[in-house]
Image (cartoon, grey):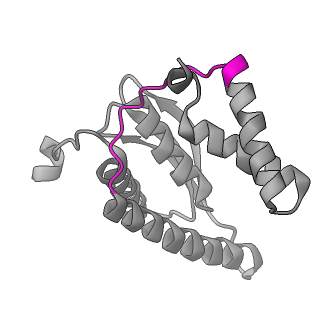
Amino acid sequence: MIRRRVQPFPLLWLTLVWVLLWGNVSWANVLGGLALGFVILMVFPLPRLSVGMTFRPVWFAVLLGHFVVDLVRASVTVAWLAVRPGRPANGVVFDVRLRGRDELLQSVTAEMVALVPGTVVIDLEPASGAMTIHALDVHDLDGARRIHRQILGQEDRVLRALATDVPGPTTEERT
């Protein structure tokens, strides 16, 4: 019964929060946090979550690496658009059809796209996988296609890093 109520990750998380609240790492704070976390989890047990994901460390590192590069590159671009002389930046709104059907992984992809400066996720339809985005500084169809490929590449990295089954390429991607 104790094993079902006290799960290791929530116990460690509660201990970390306790130590952070006290502001210093000491044996007393760590042991006190473990004891308090144990009592909290015994009194208020958390349900077991079944998240249909497979964590692949190498692909996760690739995902994070690309995300950081995209973040820095887009931050510099948006900063330049804000201070450069000349015409104001144009934007475009369009849909991207995601391949994955898992709502959690669609949300992870949408959040990673939204966190990159210059793109805003307007809507996400989990049933169809349609994500509506606004992209900044897109002037033509080629620019929209480039953003579209970047988003599908981001989704591909998310699926390779976290999905249980990585879907194969769609018919349009094969041709």
Q: Nearer the viewer, residue 31 or 100?
A: 31
Asked whether residue 150 is in view, the answer is: yes
Q: Is residue 156 left or right of residue 23?
A: left
Residue at left offset 82%, top offset 52%: 29
Judge whether 8 appears above or below 148 on screen.
above
Q: Nearer the viewer, residue 22 or 112?
A: 22
Q: Position of residue 65 (x, y in %)?
A: 45, 71
In which quarter of the view is residue 56 placed? bottom left
Figure label count: 0
Q: Position of residue 159 (x, y in %)?
A: 32, 47
Residue at left offset 78%, top offset 35%: 36
* Residue stretch rendered in magenta on the structure: 42-56
Judge whether 29 appears above or below 77 on screen.
above
Main SS of the magenta part reads: loop
In which quarter of the view is residue 88 placed? bottom right
Q: Residue furthest left?
A: 175
156 within the magenta span: no
Q: Position of residue 60 (x, y in %)?
A: 39, 60
Judge whether 17 appears above or below 1 on screen.
below
Q: Residue furthest bottom?
A: 85
Q: Nearer the viewer, residue 59 or 100?
A: 59
Q: Position of residue 128 (x, y in %)?
A: 35, 26
Q: Is residue 37 left or right of residue 32?
A: left
Judge whether 145 appears above or below 164 on screen.
below
Q: Is residue 118 left or right of residue 149?
A: right
In which quarter of the view is residue 53 placed? top left
44 within the magenta span: yes
Residue at left offset 69%, top offset 32%: 38
Asked whether residue 44 is in view, the answer is: no
